[in-house]
Amino acid sequence: MNTLHTNWLPLLSIALLSVAGSTGRAQESTVSPVQHFARSFVGFCAQSAGQNEKVVAAANALGFEELEGDMKAMVAPQDPNADYTGWLIRDNAQMPMLLGISEAEMKGMPYSNCVVANPNVPMDEVVAELQQLIGFGDLILDEEALGQRYRVWQTDAIAERSVSSVMDAPAMGIEGGTISLSAPTVLRN
């Protein structure tokens, strides 16, 4: 059973409104790029844990540009058979984001994956912001290889049997990174 805590429901509205600027509407905000990115993760991924159809509905409603061709191939999951969809979110030069979803099987159970990526925000600051917003639970992996740092948290507070991961490359002097959530797919009748 997928258990999503409802104390973040107001954040979905905030995330969607803050991202609304990507559709060309005027937006005045005092939200920093780090806060914007963290809230986008919460609004799109955490609040839709295991429910990729909600991410698709939000991306369509907000008019995000679906990835195609080389751009889609560039962000493809490692599994060549994985079904996935991605969107480009254009806020401004500082805050372009990629949003993506995919389905996978882990230990015989269907999982829904959601990821946001940005080339400019410092991921340690994003993690700190997410700890304040939603708490990330226990860090279960923190390793570096080939210049990339990969961290994984058990995030049962978001959805039972879910994990969140952050990938960045601070050792290479590269800002930005990806943050993802994998949660058991909510099966509908």
Image (tube, helix red, strand yellow):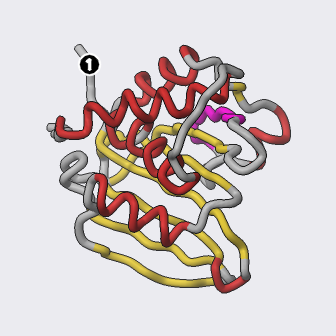
- The reply to whether the magenta stretch includes residue 122 is no
Q: Is residue 88 magenta?
A: yes
Quadrant position of the C terminus in the picture: top left
The residue range painted magenta reads 81-90
Does the magenta stretch mainly form a helix, a strand or a loop? strand
* Spot occupied by residue 170 in the image (x, y as percentages of width and height): 64, 79
Q: Position of residue 74 (x, y in %)?
A: 77, 49
Q: Residues within 10 Å of mark 1 (few under 14, many from 20)?
A: few
Query: Observer-nearest residue: 17 or 146?
Result: 17
* Residue depicted at x 64% and y 18%: 63
Rendered residue at 66%/29% (across/down): 22
Q: Is residue 185 left or right of residue 83?
A: left
Residue 43 or 69: which is nearer the viewer?
43
The percent position of residue 119, horizontal first and vertical second, equals: 70, 58
Kind of residue indicated by mark 1: Arg
Q: Vertical placement of 182 versus 91: above or below?
A: below
- Figure quadrant of the N terminus: top left
Residue 55 in the figure: left or right of residue 78: left
Circle 1 is placed at which residue position? Answer: 188
**Left or right placement of residue 187 versus residue 1 in this view:** right
Q: Does residue 137 appear to the left or right of 81 in the view shown?
A: left
Which residue is pictured at 36% across the width and 32% down the height? Answer: 12
Q: How many marks?
A: 1
Q: Nearer the viewer, residue 95 or 119?
A: 95
In this picture, is 121 found above or below 102? below
74, above or below 176, in the image: above
Identify the residue at the far right of this view: 70
Where is residue 153, by image quadrant?
bottom left
Q: Residue at x 39, y 43 (%)?
A: 42
- Mark 1, secondary structure of its residue: loop
Say which quarter of the image contains residue 2. Answer: top left
